[in-house]
Amino acid sequence: MDSPGPAILPGPVAQRARGIRLLACDVDGVLTDGRLQFFAAAGGVVEGKSFSILDGFGVKLLQETGVAVALITGRRSDIVTRRAREMGVRHVAQGVDDKKAAWGSLLAELSLEPAQSAYIGDDWPDLAVIRACGLGITVPNAPELLRRHAHYVTQAAGGAGAVRETCELIMAAQGTLQNRIDAWLQ
């Protein structure tokens, strides 16, 4: 199954993507479809989330090119910690009320400028970062306010390949996508 991927990169988006050294992602609504699942279990309730394998593989591919990936989310969940570990994501901020402050701290830690960061989010708590970063991205089902301020709106929905599309967009702009594809053609 092919990932959705951007059909044609708009010039300004490609230009912004060339200098990206960090992709920061919201979780619920971006790496998942935004639905929360709760299951009855012995001793209480267990939370569940569904993640796309396409997104996870895209994150791994992007990291192989030297672009760091981070997760910044307003909720706390052991599932997010586990998924981040599976994808090799070292930078995870959970229970964050001020995503722009968390993002700013991450930039300082990695010695990066805002223009070197892309951010993908799906709702109002993500808006300040989308407006401040070098490449602000949202998903098609995000509120109109986010779509209006984002530099790019993915074709794929959150939890259904939006992050993979974003990873491929960045790699295509940086000239590293074909290398990653060629490695799998051998």
Image: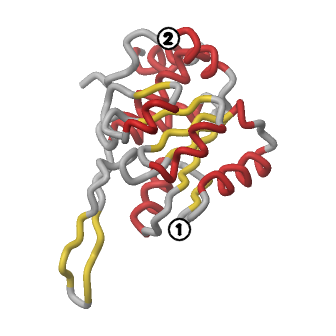
Q: Quadrant of the C terminus?
A: top left
Q: Residue furthest left?
A: 40
* Side of 178 relative to 37 (left or right): right
Residue 102 position, x and y percent, is 66, 56
Residue 147 position, x and y percent, is 43, 32
Residue positioned 65% across, 30% down in the render: 134
> What kind of element bears circle 2?
loop
Q: Nearer the viewer, residue 26 or 60?
A: 26
Task: Quadrant for residue 80, please give it.
Answer: bottom left
Label 1, on which residue? 95
- Residue type at mark 1? Gly
Q: Nearer the viewer, residue 35 or 67?
A: 35
Task: Quadrant for residue 116, please give it.
Answer: top right
Residue positioned 50% across, 38% down in the render: 60
Looking at the image, what colour scheme do you see? secondary structure
- How crowded is the residue under tag 2: few (<14 C-alpha within 10 Å), some, or many (20+)? few
- How crowded is the residue under tag 1: few (<14 C-alpha within 10 Å), some, or many (20+)? few
Residue 62 position, x and y percent, is 54, 32
